[in-house]
Amino acid sequence: MKKILFTDHQAELGGGEIELLEIIKNINLEKFYPVVLLGATGPFYEALKREKIETIIQELPVYFRTLKRSTSISTSIFSYIRSAISMPRFTAAAAGIIKDLNAEVVYANTVKSLVYAAKAAKKCNAKLIWHLHDCLTKDFYPPGVIPRIISSSKLADKIICVSEVVKKAYLKAGGEDKNAIVIYNGVDTIRFNPDINVEDIKGSLNAKDKKIISLIGRLEEWKGQKVFIRAAESVCRKRDDVIFLIAGGPLFGCKTYEQQLKAMVKDLRMEKKIIFLGHQTNPEIIMAASDIVTHCSTKPEPFGRDIIEAMACGVPVIASNIGASPEIIENGNTGLLIDPANPNALAEAITELLKQPQQMKLFSVNARQKSVNDFGIKSITAKISDIL
């Protein structure tokens, strides 16, 4: 049995952590023994415990764990310096854990965990896999940081890119093509399905006779909640039978942004039409209850987990036509692609699609089928298992 040490610098439940959890839940335990190394306790740690997955905590300092993917290094220069100075210590601690476990494979699930786990894996003669969930571009990282990431990546035996967009950005940043492959994120198509009972949630929202339009994901500026709010205001001028849901919490220090969004809705006097649901542990219920799910990112999305989850629930998706969205959605067949950062385009797409119930039904059937065929978590995990 091959022992795999999965590393992640944090314990929040972001998209990458959800994907890792699904991979470990579906891995062949007769062939692999998974152990997870985290940099802190938190929601991800609790989720791993519930699944009875062995987890080790290598406590990492807050200044490193919370270092943002800011395009301006000046706002956190001291954290960058302290992190760089501390890196040999992080690496040594990781190497000790790899050696004690006798792990044959180290699987870095984040950029930060790669930086300290790469040299540790090589020191212990372990195979190194890096799961790249981010676009290594100036949209997300300071230019001076990217070369350090690329340097660490060259120690990897295999790099899993979550989309062609991510791979292209990695190569453009200086990465090597020979070890980089694309494996899309996966979705549990049993948990996310069109037959979820949604009567209770519709009743609690007083929305049994309403059309529900949703935006689901963490609250962060580039995720486009402001675009969604402006589009909602426009749609509500034309229709009174709609409500708009914003589901997601402010991860990674975005509490101020959440306050801005709520103030924006209040200023527009849309509190009864735009409802903040906060973080959802069962997003499939919100998705299944929705008539349309939107994806409003204003920067190139590395993947878009909310898109495949909504598709698995048989819900039409309207998404920004940037990043990986065009790789997931077949425009006009499984959903719609629109210009990014354009509230008018989003409002028009919502309004027109609601007028076409037959088109919505076609999107629903096609989206569900594509999610099963292309993004089922079992087949995705099998592809990853082949390179472990």
Image (cartoon, grey):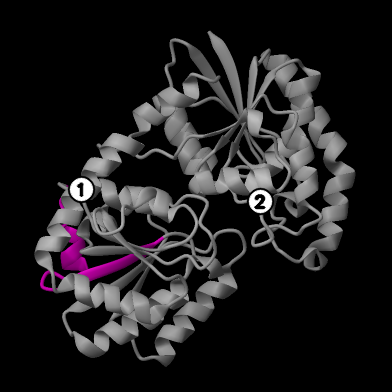
Q: Residue at x 35, y 28 (%)?
A: 378
Residue 214 inside the magenta-drawn segment: yes
| Relative vertical location of residue 167 with respect to residue 354 in this rendering, above or below | above
Q: Residue at x 42, y 55 (%)?
A: 325
The reply to whether residue 271 is visible in this rendering is no
Q: Over which residues does the magenta segment extend?
A: 196-216
Q: Residues within 10 Å of mark 2 (few under 14, many from 20)?
A: many
Q: Please name whichever residue, 42 or 335, is drawn nearer the observer in this view of the structure.
A: 335
Q: Position of residue 372 (x, y in %)?
A: 27, 37
**According to the image, label 1 marks what residue?**
366
Q: Residues within 10 Å of mark 1 (few under 14, many from 20)?
A: many
Q: Please name whichever residue, 187 or 178, is drawn nearer the observer in this view of the structure.
A: 178
Res 213 → quadrant: bottom left
> Which badge, 1 or 2, is on the more N-terminal residue?
2
Q: Amino acid at mark 1?
A: Asn
Q: Amino acid at mark 2?
A: Leu
Q: Residue at x 59, y 46 (%)?
A: 168
Q: Identify the secondary structure beneath mark 1.
A: helix
Q: Which residue occupies the extreme top position in the image?
A: 1
Res 167 → quadrant: top right
Q: Quadrant of the C terminus?
A: top right
The reply to whether residue 154 is visible in this rendering is yes
Q: Position of residue 195 (x, y in %)?
A: 15, 46
Q: Is residue 268 rendered to the left or right of residue 126?
A: left
Q: Residue at x 67, y 24 (%)?
A: 157
Q: Position of residue 246 (x, y in %)?
A: 37, 68
Residue 308 inside the magenta-drawn segment: no
Q: Is residue 320 rendered to the left or right of residue 125?
A: left
Q: Identify the secondary structure beneath mark 2.
A: loop
**According to the image, label 2 marks what residue?**
136
